[in-house]
Amino acid sequence: MKQVIARNATTGAALAPQTSVADSMWPRFRGLMLRRPLEEGEALLIRPCSSVHMFFMRFALDIVFIDKQGAVVKIVTGLKPWRMALGGKGAWSALEMPAGAAAGRVGLGDRLEFDAAT
């Protein structure tokens, strides 16, 4: 999978320097199912994606839903296994981060950017 660096362009905060991009059918379907928990600094960007499910997951996640322009439209914190979350109006992609990783680092309306990893 392609790797990018996720950052909050509004605040300048680095969100996840090790972000994998799932932008084709199989990686989007598989997501983080049956995998080890994300470490600090890791994330998964799923696009397109307007909702997520936590079926077959073993750990909770923070989900940041983003519109096509990169603006945060919804944040779901601590989504537990076997639950679902809808991104709502305008959601085009989802950034999945370890539970607690979004707190104080991203807010509604913030603009996120994804730069190529070096």
Image (spheres, grey):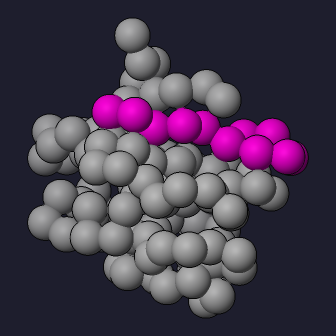
Q: In which image quadrant can residue 102 be found?
A: bottom left
Q: Quadrant of the C terminus?
A: top left
Q: In which image quadrant can residue 22 be found?
A: top right
Q: Going by the picture, which residue comes out furthest to the right? A: 25
Q: Nearer the viewer, residue 20 or 92?
A: 20
What stretch of residues is rendered in magenta? 17-27
- Residue in the image at 18% along x and 58% along y: 105
Q: Is residue 22 magenta?
A: yes
Q: Quadrant of the N terminus?
A: top right
Q: Answer left or right for 70 relative to 34.
A: left
**Residue 61 x, y percent position in the rendering:** 44, 71
Q: Answer left or right for 5 relative to 96.
A: left
Q: Is residue 69 visible?
A: yes
Above/below status of 83 relative to 105? below
**Residue 36 x, y percent position in the rendering:** 53, 56
Above/below status of 37 relative to 47? below
- Residue in the image at 85% along x and 46% along y: 26
- Residue in the image at 64% along x and 88% along y: 82
**Residue 9 x, y percent position in the rendering:** 24, 40
Above/below status of 59 relative to 20? below
Q: Answer left or right for 44 relative to 52.
A: left
Q: Is residue 83 magenta?
A: no
